[in-house]
Image (spheres, rainbow, N blue to C red):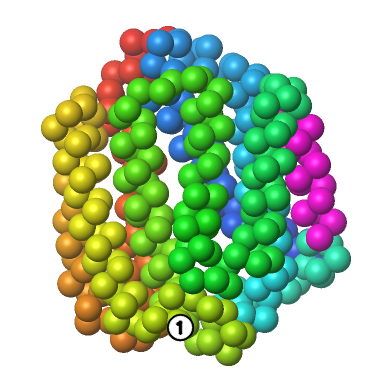
């Protein structure tokens, strides 16, 4: 059995893991490697990709920067999270604000050091990324439209670091990116609906607060409709292998999302909608392997 000190350390670990959203970071790391293997570096062997130290540094730099971003976001949103996510907030508060800020600077510094191993261009990319996350957390997230747009862009930027590294400019990659961007944009707007109470009390100027829930639902409906364009292009103009199953599933889930959206009135309803979008994103990561299920055997 754990003694009191061990329990305290374990709670601190889970608290920090909660603050940096460790589960999200693990998914992003996996997504970057799967994207490299199945989409961006299709002309390289599996061994070349997995043992590429430059790629590892970029993935780690992305993970550290994102973790630092969650910390600074948690720092600025501590009061709002106490209202919107009281249970999570209590766990997060086991780590002091000073400790969180110390981790924030250490993680960002480490990310820049890792990027410097790859190239000066990579350093500039991550310095810009770090500044963008801070500026979003400090100022932009309180603004309607701009905050949502910035958040969606910051979410997909780690994949562009890998994209720029491999210099793969095929159009199919941009179509995948547009699909992801639209889903992430929907998730951000749904989160605003979910967090309406805390945002209102702390004077956040989100789209649901400034324009109302009905306008937010109309915007979400438009975004769902727009996802049909990249899905159609990916299914008709490009070879996505068995990943077509994922896109069909996504369309079904998005139609269900729309039906539930217009009946939603409470935080619980919006949480369900948020989880549907989150499932689509996570499922999309694992379904990347369906592009070519034999790729691992063929490229060893």
- Of the 4 image quadrants, the one containing the C terminus is top left
* Horizontal and vertical percent position of residue 190: 39, 70
- The residue positioned 67% from the left and 43% from the top of the image is 128
Quadrant containing the N terminus is bottom right
> Residue 260 at x, y = what percent?
22, 74
Report the span colored magenta.
101-115
Q: For this rendering, which residue is in front, 9 or 278?
A: 278
Q: Main secondary structure of the magenta part?
A: helix
Residue topped by disc 1: 209
Answer whether residue 190 is magenta in the image: no
Q: Is residue 5 left or right of residue 271?
A: right
Name which residue lies at 30% across and 67% down.
220
Dot 1 falls on a residue whose secondary structure is helix
Q: Is residue 189 visible?
A: yes
Would residue 264 be found to the left or right of residue 181 on screen?
left
Single out the residue that lies furthest toward the bottom. 201
Say if 246 sits above or below 207 in the image.
Answer: above
* Image location of residue 81, percent across then percent down: 61, 77
24 is higher (above) or lower (below) than 33: below
């Amino acid at each position: 059995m754990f003694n009191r000190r061990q329990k305290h350390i374990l709670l601190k670990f889970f608290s920090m893991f909660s603050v940096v959203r460790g589960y999200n970071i693990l998914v992003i790391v996996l997504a970057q490697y799967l994207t490299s293997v199945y989409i961006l570096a299709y002309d390289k062997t599996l061994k070349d990709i997995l043992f590429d130290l430059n790629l590892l540094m970029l993935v780690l730099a992305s993970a550290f920067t994102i973790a630092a971003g969650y910390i600074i976001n948690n720092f600025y949103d501590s009061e709002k999270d106490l209202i919107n996510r009281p249970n999570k907030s209590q766990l997060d508060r086991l780590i002091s604000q000073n400790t969180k800020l110390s981790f924030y600077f250490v993680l960002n510094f480490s990310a820049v050091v890792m990027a410097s191993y790859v190239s000066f261009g990579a350093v500039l990319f991550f310095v810009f990324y770090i500044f963008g996350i801070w500026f979003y957390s400090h100022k932009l997230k309180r603004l309607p439209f701009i905050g949502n747009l910035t958040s969606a862009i910051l979410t997909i930027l780690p994949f562009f670091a890998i994209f720029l590294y491999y210099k793969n400019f095929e159009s199919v990659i941009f179509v995948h990116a547009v699909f992801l961007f639209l889903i992430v944009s929907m998730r951000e707007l749904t989160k605003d609906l979910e967090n309406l109470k805390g945002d209102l009390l702390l004077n956040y100027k989100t789209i649901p607060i400034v324009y109302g829930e009905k306008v937010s639902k109309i915007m979400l409906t438009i975004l769902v409709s727009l996802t049909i364009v990249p899905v159609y292009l990916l299914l008709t103009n490009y070879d996505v292998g068995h990943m077509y199953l994922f896109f069909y599933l996504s369309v079904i889930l998005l139609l269900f999302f729309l039906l539930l959206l217009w009946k939603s009135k409470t935080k619980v309803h919006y949480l369900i909608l948020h989880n549907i979008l989150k499932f689509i994103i996570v499922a999309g990561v694992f379904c990347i392997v369906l592009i070519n299920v034999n790729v691992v055997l063929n490229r060893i």
